[in-house]
Amino acid sequence: MDMRVAADASGSEDEPWTLPEGWCWTDLSVCLKDVERADPAKLFGNEDFSYIDLSAISRGEISSPQRLRGTAAPSRARQLVQAGDTLYSCVRVYLRNNALVLAGVPKPIASTAFCVLRPNAALSPKFLNYFVGSQSFVRRMIPLQRGNSPPSVLDSDVKSQLIALPPLPEQHRIVERIESLFAEIAEGEAALEDARKGLETFRRALLKAAVTGELTRDWRENNQPKESGHDLLARIKAKRGATSTSGRGKRAAVSASLDTSDLPELPEGWAWARISDVGVVQLGRQRSPQHHQGENMHRYLRVANVFEDRIELADVKEMNFTPPELETFELRRNDILLNEGQTPDLLGRPAMWRSDERGMCFQNTLLRFRATEPMEPEFCLLVFRHYLHAKRFKQESQITTNIAHLSSGRFSVIEFPVPPIDEQREIVRRALTALDSTVDAKLVFEQQKADAARLRQAILKSAFEGTLVPQDPADEPASIMLERLKQSAPTAKAGRRGRGKAPHGG
């Protein structure tokens, strides 16, 4: 038996830290039993069994095992597991994809992508599961990964690791304390999630209030705009006519009169229009192999770059845009981009281009809306964000497989509320102030969520260093316990330290 009792030193490569009285260092294999393998087809025939592969593990639990007939078992379904076993994923170990098998899973069979750890009488099953899920254990395993598709470790890599073994009664006290502290963290996380959902509800209600006039109800009582929304639309129409007559620029299509009979009533001074009445809509440039090279290479944005009120530039591609194409597809400050093709609930996800950078274009998976002066672009963005959450864009979509599309034609004729320009500016001021505060709150939530994960690992670190609970001198020392178990089972096989298996996939 390879058993090393902690010395008084401060730690070494073989013994990473000094252990409390009664603890000892030993190979994990010393604390494990062998696990049987079998062919489910021979074992169960046409009866069902529970197949646990990597996809069945979620947040440290076996959440969705597959119910399969024995005769339909995949080749990896070979390990007979039971309640108390820990399934340790040998694939991409940095994901910490381990789980404890609980009672109630009928006829469980695990994939050979797992190293199945079955503790003997020296080791608490829950203690073992927490141990291999700790950050310190994962750090030891990462350098042992082999291969690239995907990277994995061997069973023997896992079982040959050192474990700081407490007396068995102390293991139970440690587990009880871990579970108590983790339950408190979970309560905090649940409260954070409720707060996050409340924040999202507030944001959506704020967007709706902004574009329906509720946000500025008190403002209207004390302010008389110089022109109404109808006057503003007439001025935009006249400006477009003058631009077209003078031959300067491309005239946006002005739609026919909008039927408002089924639309909500707007505040006094507001008017309904179509999107094409208040801005120019342009579908992006189509990708083609012939555009991958050329003398006029320019960066362009696509769906992967455009999120709600945010444009990510970490991964921007290039293609050739001739000078006339550049004139059509180049972005200007305050242009709004919307996803033309996306999952239905995210269709029309909008963001504003807020840069003066020249030469940035956009692909035909995006629609560009360019507000016609004097429309306030930030107000237009608020309308589009509200339509995203209200599923207004989804209503106009055409769905192919799982992807919804919003053509420029369908987008252009969607109704659009037009307040007086002074009220648009007040709406933008109030809405952005409130939305900025929600962004700050969201950052706090994300930080606290990260803090909860770090706190869990700090608890585990304390647990396996022997500082989480006090020691009891009456406990049988771990080294004596191991020796006693060895003497009581002289024929028991030690854990395998051979080459093991190299798992890949689920």
Image (tube, grey):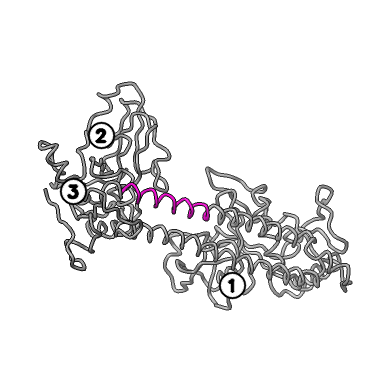
Does residue 44 appear anywhere in the picture? yes
Q: Amino acid at mark 2?
A: Arg
What's drawn in magenta, residue-wise?
A: 171-189
Residue labelled with disc 2: 78
Q: Is residue 32 left or right of residue 46?
A: left
Position of 276 compared to 188: left or right? right
Q: Quadrant of residue 484?
A: top left
Residue 214 x, y percent position in the rendering: 79, 60
Question: Label 3 crowding class (10 Å Cα cut-off): few <14, some 14-19, many 20+?
Answer: some
Q: Earlier in the sequence, mark 1 or mark 2?
A: 2
Residue 250 shows in the view: no
Q: Are marks 3 and 2 in contact (CB under 8 Å)?
A: no
Residue 321 vertical placement versus 94 (above, below): below
Q: Nearer the viewer, mark 3 or mark 2?
A: 3
The quadrant of the picture occupied by the C terminus is top left
Q: Position of residue 138 (x, y in %)?
A: 29, 57
* Mark 3, secondary structure of its residue: helix
Task: Count residues near mark 1 (Cα–Cα under 10 Å), then give few for <14, some for 14-19, many for 20+.
Answer: few
Q: Is residue 177 magenta?
A: yes
Decide which of 45, 470 is in the foreground and name it: 470
Report the front residue among 305 and 362.
305
